[in-house]
Image: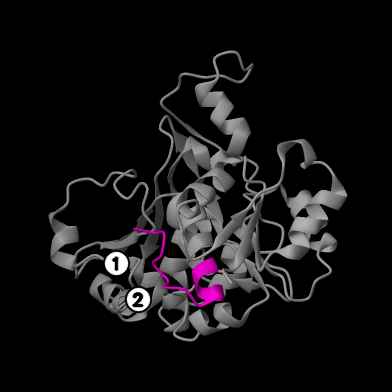
Amino acid sequence: MKPKVFIDGEAGTTGLQIRDRLKDRADIELVSIDPAQRKDPAARAALLNGADVVILCLPDDAAREAVTLITNPAVRVIDASTAHRTANGWIYGFPEMTPHYHQMIAQAKRVANPGCWATGAIALLRPLVTAGLMGPDYPVSIGGISGYSGGGKAMIAEFENESDPTFTKVPYRIYGLELAHKHVPEIQKVSGMRIRPLMAPSVGRYAQGMLVEIPLHLTLLSPGLKSSDIHAVLTRAYKNQAFIEVVARDKSNALKTLAPEDLNNTNKMRLFVFGQDGGDQARLVAQLDNLGKGASGAAVQNMNIMLGLPEAAGLA
């Protein structure tokens, strides 16, 4: 029998993208709730407990509630919210993180899908910490830009709905000024940092796609450290990974600019190391689709792994 997959919250931005990636798949059975029964606890519970894999695309509190409704021990869960990303008993859903992480996800009952900013930041940071090039007390700053879809319904309305009181025509703005971005806890924990990273995000007037940037002072990391050393560590970390490319140094050095939308509608992520050898600074950049590898694509990738299906199915 085909495995049953239920997306709880399929009407939201991420849920719609996941459904679009799954709706024509012949190797799974995608089940949905009657729209009239979305707020019926009994109807939801029946679907939650009758699926092989449940993908939660809900606000944090609703995601926690959904997990409590699951009493069938055979049901496996992927949570796309922030609710369980640092919770005990949940596997962080970044398959490329270590050589053995793919197998951990394959065996997991509960998988927390990473945040979009966190996907780029952790991809750049964790290999450096693991290799000893970056100490856990290094004062990391993370910047960049994302499309407004990354902010959910409220931010989408701000840029698209002229009748919304928050509507704006600005081409670009910064946010997260309270320095408490929701992705910081998972970035700190999963990257292995003792000092809380400083997040300085911004959003542009375009729907999706992002650049995540981490500037580094190499002399503060290690005497004699070169940007090519960082590139070599990242290259080894993601060797033979289908969805992550560490861009060659000559290609990076030839670039004059980098666009956040280049990988839209894919599950790919590109990592760049800018900076000349002999210099004392480097600029690390992750390029990805915040709704792809940063959300729906990652969820489908994790689902494929958990069900023993081809990892790239539905992700072309």
- Image spot of residue 256 (x, y percent): 17, 47
Classify 147 as above or below 168.
below
Q: Amino acid at mark 1?
A: Glu
Give me the residue at 40% from left, 50% from top. Answer: 289
Position of 154 compared to 202: left or right? right
Give me the residue at 63% from left, 74% from top. Answer: 91
Of the two numbered discs 1 and 2 on the same chain, state the one appearing first in sequence.
Answer: 2
Range drawn in magenta? 303-316
Identify the residue at the far right of this view. Answer: 42
| Colour option used | one colour
Tag 1 residue: 245
Q: State which quadrant residue 48 falls in.
A: bottom right
| Tag 1 near tag 2, CB within 8 Å | yes
Q: Could you give the CA–CA distance between mark 1 and mark 2, rounded to whole angstroms?
A: 7 Å
Position of 275 compared to 310: left or right? left
Identify the residue at the far front of this view. Answer: 1
- Image spot of residue 235 (x, y percent): 29, 76
- Image spot of residue 93 (x, y percent): 56, 69
Give me the residue at 19% from left, 70% from top. Answer: 278
Tag 2 residue: 238
* Residue 306 is inside the magenta segment: yes
Comparing 281 with 190, the one in front is: 190
Q: Is residue 194 visible?
A: no
Location of the N terminus by quadrant is: bottom right
Helix, strand or loop at disc 1?
Answer: strand
